[in-house]
Amino acid sequence: MPDLPEFIFDIDCDVTPPSGMEALLARVARHCLAAEGVTRPCCAYLLITDDETIHRVNREQRGVDRATDVLSFPSAPFRPGRTAGNAPALLQREWDADFKACRLGDIVISMDHVRTQAAEYGHSETRELAYLTAHALFHLMGYDHMQEKDKEVMRKMEEKALNAAGVSRVTDDELVEKAKEAMLFSYSPYSKFKVGACLLAADGRTFTGCNIENASYGATMCAERTALFKAVSEGAQSFTAIAVAAEKSMPWPCGLCRQALNEFAPELRVIVACGDERDEAPLSVLLPHGFGPSNGTGEYLGKD
Ligand code: THU
């Protein structure tokens, strides 16, 4: 992401966050800055904690005696109508020499609330955490939702940033459901291991695929690559998540599929499902030190 502004999260974590969270939240934050038109590097403190601690902070700092999902404490005193994008001097005053970035403020998020809200909305904890982080960052940049019209503006900004960061509104439940439907088309008379996949493109389109076996076994194609190749052949090259479903066991993608997906989306969220069981990991965790386009094979070939 060379043309996105820099963002540094100074994170404290009291509880276990979803895997791969730091990279995702940094990406979301950079897209929040870009959506707001901020070009300077920025930073913020983020405490990921539980209901008990957020309740205490809410009581002590705001006099509100209850737990909540997210709290934000802006550094810069933006007046109504002023936000980070249209008040660069205010932002500049918050320059933090240690972080070499403008300090936007502090955020506290309760993972207890993240968990219950994710279940309520039928999406992942990662998505809920990303949403709450974007919401808090826009508060830190001067946005509010007291009036209906302000709320609308703030929601639009959140959506713009989250979509650009690839945290789409298509829920994980919908992706898994589509993967399960695609599984019904599996052609797997040899292994009898049916697999279905649903790949979510950054533009919100979804592409499904199933495994397609062959009497010459090596000609078999996995569900994930079927979905990927369908997508690329229809013009999509940027992806945010894939759901893979199977009947017999959790279908973590094979090595070949990890490599193929890494070409287009090294930060892809990979969700696997079998019956009611569900798990998730970023592709960068499934394929550490992956070899991809940034390894510069083109330049190497060019020199020879
Ligand atoms: N398979 C997939 O479709 N995806 C995977 O990630 C693992 C394996 C298929 C290929 C073959 O048709 C069957 O599962 C058994 O290996």
Image (cartoon, rainbow, N blue to C red):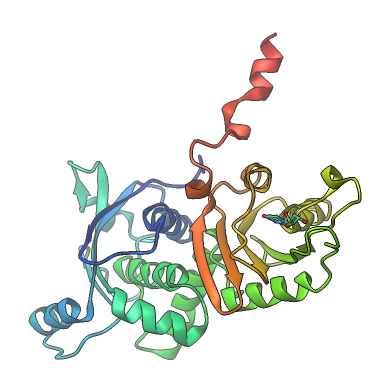
Question: Is residue 150 among what the camera can see?
Answer: no
The vertical placement of 277 against 19, above or below, is: below
Q: Residue at x 77, y 71 (%)?
A: 182
Q: Outermost residue toward the right?
A: 215
Q: Quadrant of the C terminus?
A: top right
Q: Residue 36 at what x, y percent from top left? A: 44, 61
At 67% from the left edge and 48% from the top edge, which residue is drawn? 257
x and y percentages locating residue 235 in the rendered image: 79, 53
Residue 3 position in % (x across, y down): 51, 42
Report whether 300 appears left or right of 211: left
Relative to 218, residue 82 above or below: below
Is residue 234 found left or right of 67 in the rendered image?
right
Q: Nearer the viewer, residue 134 or 24?
A: 24
Relative to 145, does residue 221 appear above or below in the rendering?
above
Residue 85: % across, % down: 40, 59
Q: Which quarter holds ligand 1?
A: bottom right
Residue 28's quadrant in the figure? bottom left
Towards the viewer: 131 or 224: 224
Nearest the eye: 81 or 23: 23
Q: Number of callouts in the render? A: 0
Q: Is residue 82 visible?
A: yes
- Furthest residue to the top? 304
Q: Camera-side residue: 172 or 140? A: 172
Q: Is residue 126 left or right of residue 302?
A: left
